[in-house]
Image (tube, grey):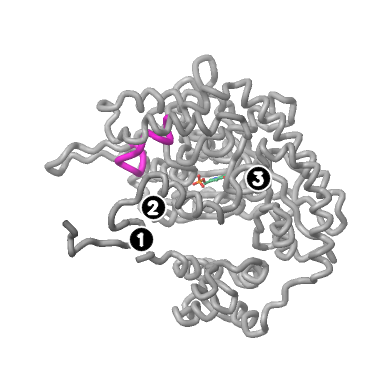
């Protein structure tokens, strides 16, 4: 019998699609994505290129996908795997029996942003007597601190980094601590430039003021310790540093676990306590959540567990060595090209470069690299720092390094020949003069169309070349960049009926 009321919209098929065909659909959709494997993508994805690892992680994910982290007593498997991940992260970061941080505890979160939000929440809620709490970060701190401050209604104080070292002056950080400051944070390393902040000095200043100090090692927490063991001069940044009260490390970055797993560590259980949310004042189950989500899939946790067990300490040491050599090769390639210079000497797994005076337009260069199959990340100019190109380097890049130099040389030549993007005069004028408050939906739609975005008509929601979009954004102050991107992305995120 056919139901007259049968619905079909977007993902909901009318009659049910056979499994094989559904998988084909997913694969067809995936075909337009950036390549997650192959060592030519320098952001978003962390690939160790270890044969069989994807299959192992997927199998572990499948075993636990329907297990719910909501209640550790109902699913002790997840409790055990989470405790094992926290123990591993603690060990890698200078904690555990026999260290100066034997009482470290932690939580498994969905990602770095959640880890940082929870570090800020714990710090805020440890001080209910402070009516208007504040956190203090260097300007190079990850945007997730600003998100945490925004979500939690905590004020954000920012100390600018030096344009030369890309690090904050510890004395300036110390001087910026106020009576209402509940957390001081720094990065090991910063995402944008890959430099390690002066953690020991900043942590000492925070301890002196009686304030918590969080080290955001979301990016580098799983590589810096191994790079140090390989003989690299990695400054102290972990629990060995007195005054560091919490550290975050993303397992879905350099622990090479599939997406959805980060660890937030606290030096002791008392520091973690205000992170929890418990609620018994309703007729349902008493809710006790260490993290933001309540129902949580066991899939990512089991996949991370399998990844760590399989790669092991030796595996991570080997991958760090491979990655270090790839970083050195890419940095050499940048140094060899006229018109480019490194933003900083690489001290972790980031290569970040900018253009010298008379060098190529970086946004055009990024498009030229994309056209040659290299997916890099453009970074807009900001507060005295020039626009730059960011490369997150993972082990999978190593076999490709020799191909990068010649392509970079070619791309720079092509970008130089093409010259800088010239914004249509009316767009340039708009970017300079608009305030976020001026943006009406009509104006944004007009801008988006002018930039070749969101046009359903030509079937491509994004322009082939992004240089014009990046140039427009670069010409706008941060508040306008934010509004424009919210509007642009909002245009993309519309239901398919
Ligand atoms: C990636 C990153 C974050 C945010 O992590 P997500 O997993 O993307 O939420 C925070 N801090 C640093 C230094 C990072 O590299």
Which residue does the numbered mark 1 point to in the structure image?
10
Q: Residue at x 50, y 16 (%)?
A: 97
Label 1 element class? loop
Asked if residue 274 lies in the magenta stretch, the reply is: no
x then y, percent, for residue 113: 47, 46
The mark closer to the camera, 3 or 2, is 3
Is any atom of residue 28 visible in this view?
A: yes
User: What is the magenta range?
Assistant: 290-302
x then y, percent, for residue 200: 62, 35
Q: Residue at x 72, y 73 (%)?
A: 421
Image quarter hosting the C terminus: bottom left
**Marking on residue 392:** 3
- Dot 1, how many residues are within 10 Å of its Cα: few (below 14), some (14-19), or many (20+)? few
x then y, percent, for residue 64: 36, 31
The mark closer to the camera, 1 or 3, is 1
Dot placed on the residue nearer the N-terminal end, 1 or 3: 1
Residue 44 as seen in the image, left or right of residue 385: left
**Marking on residue 152:** 2
Label 2 element class? helix
From this viewpoint, which residue is outermost toward the top? Answer: 98
Q: Nearer the viewer, residue 395 or 135?
A: 395
Q: CA distance from mark 1 to mark 3?
A: 35 Å
Asked whether mark 1 and ligand 1 are closer than 8 Å, the reply comes as no
Asked if residue 297 lies in the magenta stretch, the reply is: yes
């Amino acid at each position: 019998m056919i139901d007259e009321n049968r619905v079909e919209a977007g993902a909901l098929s009318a009659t049910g699609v056979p499994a094989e065909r559904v998988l084909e659909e997913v694969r067809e959709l995936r075909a337009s994505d950036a390549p997650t494997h192959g060592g030519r993508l320098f952001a978003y994805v962390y690939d160790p290129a270890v044969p069989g690892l994807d299959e192992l992680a997927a199998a572990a994910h499948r075993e636990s996908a329907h297990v719910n982290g909501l209640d550790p007593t109902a699913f002790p498997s997840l409790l055990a795997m989470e405790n094992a991940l926290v123990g591993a992260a603690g060990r890698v970061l200078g904690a555990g029996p026999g260290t100066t941080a034997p009482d470290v505890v932690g939580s498994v979160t969905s990602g770095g942003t959640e880890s940082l939000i929870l570090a800020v929440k714990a710090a805020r809620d440890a001080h209910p007597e402070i009516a208007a709490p504040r956190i203090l970060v260097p300007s190079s701190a990850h945007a997730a601190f600003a998100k945490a401050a925004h979500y939690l209604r905590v004020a954000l104080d920012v100390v600018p980094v030096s344009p030369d070292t890309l690090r904050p002056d510890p004395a300036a950080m110390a001087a910026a601590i106020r009576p209402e400051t509940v957390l001081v944070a720094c990065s090991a390393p910063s995402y944008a430039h890959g430099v390690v902040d002066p953690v020991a000095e900043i942590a000492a200043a925070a301890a002196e003021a009686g304030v918590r100090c969080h080290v955001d090692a979301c990016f580098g927490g799983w590589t810096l310790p191994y790079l140090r063991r390989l003989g690299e001069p990695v400054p102290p940044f972990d629990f060995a540093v007195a005054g560091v009260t919490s550290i975050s490390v993303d397992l879905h970055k350099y622990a090479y676990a599939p997406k959805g797993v980060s660890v937030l560590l606290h030096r002791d259980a008392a520091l973690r306590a205000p992170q929890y949310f418990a609620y018994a004042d309703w007729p349902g189950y008493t809710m006790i959540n260490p993290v933001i989500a309540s129902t949580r899939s066991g899939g990512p946790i089991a996949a991370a567990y399998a990844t760590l067990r399989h790669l092991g300490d030796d595996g991570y040491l080997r991958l760090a060595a491979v990655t270090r050599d790839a970083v050195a090769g890419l940095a050499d390639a940048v140094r060899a090209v006229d018109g480019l210079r490194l933003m900083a000497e690489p001290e972790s797994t980031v290569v970040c470069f900018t253009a010298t005076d008379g060098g190529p337009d970086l946004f055009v260069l990024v498009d030229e690299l994309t056209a040659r199959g290299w997916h890099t990340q453009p970074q807009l100019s900001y507060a005295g720092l020039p626009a730059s190109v960011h490369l997150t380097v993972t082990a999978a890049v190593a076999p490709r390094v020799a191909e990068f130099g010649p392509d970079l040389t070619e791309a720079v030549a092509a970008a130089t020949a093409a010259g800088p993007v010239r914004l249509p005069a009316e767009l340039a004028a708009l970017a300079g003069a608009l305030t976020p408050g001026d943006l009406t939906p009509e104006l944004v739609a007009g801008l988006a169309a002018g930039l070749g975005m969101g046009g359903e008509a030509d079937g491509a929601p994004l322009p082939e070349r992004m240089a014009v979009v990046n140039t427009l954004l670069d010409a706008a102050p941060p508040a306008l960049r934010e509004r424009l991107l919210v509007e642009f992305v909002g245009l993309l995120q519309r239901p398919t009926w």
